[in-house]
Amino acid sequence: RPRVVSGVQPSADSLHLGNYVGAVRNWVRMQDENECVFFVADLHAVTVEQDPATLARRTRVTAAQYIAAGIDPERSTLLVQSHVPEHAQLAWALNCITGFGEASRMTQFKDKSAKQGADNATVGLFAYPVLMAADILVYQAHAVPVGEDQRQHLELTRNLAQRFNTRFGDTFVVPEPKILAETAKVYDLQQPTAKMSKSAASENGLIRLLDPAKKNAKKIKAAVTDDGTEIRFDREAKPGVSNLLTIYSALTGRPVDEIVAEYEGRMYGHLKVGLAEVVTEVLTPIQQRAQELLDDPAELDRILARGAEKGREVTAATLSTVYERMGFLPRL
Ligand code: TYM
């Protein structure tokens, strides 16, 4: 079965709707036909400063949300990135075949380091996309379901896989990005031309999976909409309404056209009320399940330990091949 790998950084106390609609929700469906590895990217989170206790808490909370959203730790491998040392070990090897200029061209690094000031950005932040390549290649993944913002990192991953294969002999599967056109980018509710992100300019632009239904409904009702009154999908002329329709469609599994037809002749406010109900309906059971899991952290930790063990069966084999091909002297 094809192997699928993906992850989210535990950099907040809740996933947001962009992570869910753009990534995690699509992972759930892929479990049927693929051998999936989903991990919590804690090594990536520390590329910016983290409070240690907060990081540990958020790592559990993120894992709990994966399961609550429908990732089945029996069928899929669910693990914490730092529990599987081969991620970081392979990253070092890949760092040594990555060009400095090549890494400098990563737009996410350029954006983030510009925000922080070049002197505050860490070497870890610079090397972040190479670690991401290692996360994927260490499992010999065929497909990587992510949002649009990760496309360039996937391109780098493919380049590094091909480069390694050319230089040292066929070692890695060259992975394909799985970026679903409809949900590749969920936009900020207050600024519907910017992606929804935890570093949003306004708190009101962001829907968190674990926030109370009322709070989320209020934000949806306050979402920026567009000139005119007609409810139709048009990213250019109607980015606000189109974003609401995208989220509505993703969460219900109904085509956008059908939703547009349902709301024909009605006002933006009606669409918002409808969407708030849909969001509540989808998130309430996820919140309940996540809470149950967090109430029993020992069981959650056992699930993660099993995941790490399963993961290592694959990663240890990849790493030993890589080390051998690179000429590292085998330890007796
Ligand atoms: P992160 O934690 O920023 O985001 C997790 C996933 O959510 C997607 N996403 C979105 N999709 C649609 N609309 C949005 N507004 C939106 N915001 C976020 C992201 O595209 C991503 O799929 N580097 C990664 C984590 C990572 C990873 C990996 C992913 C580390 N190693 C290996 C795949 C494979 C990141 O920071 O994602």
Image (cartoon, rainbow, N blue to C red):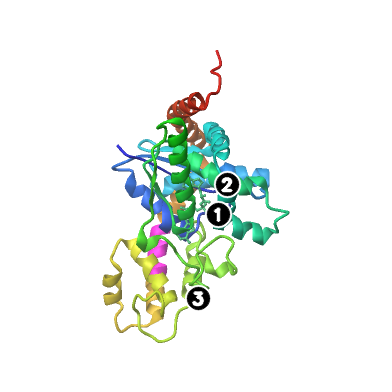
Name the residue beneath numbered marker 3.
Answer: 222
Q: Amino acid at mark 1?
A: Met
**Stretch of the chain drawn in magenta:** 275-283
How far apart are the alpha carbons under marks 3 and 1? 34 Å
How far apart are the alpha carbons under marks 2 and 3? 36 Å
How far apart are the alpha carbons under marks 1 and 2? 10 Å
> For residue 55, what is the image quadrant?
top right
Q: Amino acid at mark 2?
A: Tyr
| x and y, in percent, of residue 85 in the image | 55, 31
| x and y, in percent, of residue 130 in the image | 54, 43
Where residue 106 is drawn, which disc sits there? 1
Instruction: Please identify the residue farthest to the bottom as the structure is shown.
Output: 228
Q: Mark 3 or mark 1: which comes first in sequence?
A: 1
Can residue 185 be seen? yes
Name the residue beneath numbered marker 2.
Answer: 128
Image quadrant in which the N terminus is located: top left
The residue depicted at 58 percent of the width and 67 percent of the height is 203
Is residue 332 one of those drawn in magenta?
A: no
Q: Secondary structure at mark 3?
A: loop
194 or 56: nearer the viewer: 194
User: Tags 1 and 2 in contact by the CB under 8 Å rule?
Assistant: yes
Magenta highlight: main SS: helix
143 or 14: nearer the viewer: 143
Task: Give the number of the mark in front: 2 or 3.
Answer: 2
Instruction: Please identify the residue farthest to the right as the structure is shown.
Output: 119
Q: Mark 2 or mark 3: which comes first in sequence?
A: 2
Q: Secondary structure at mark 1?
A: loop
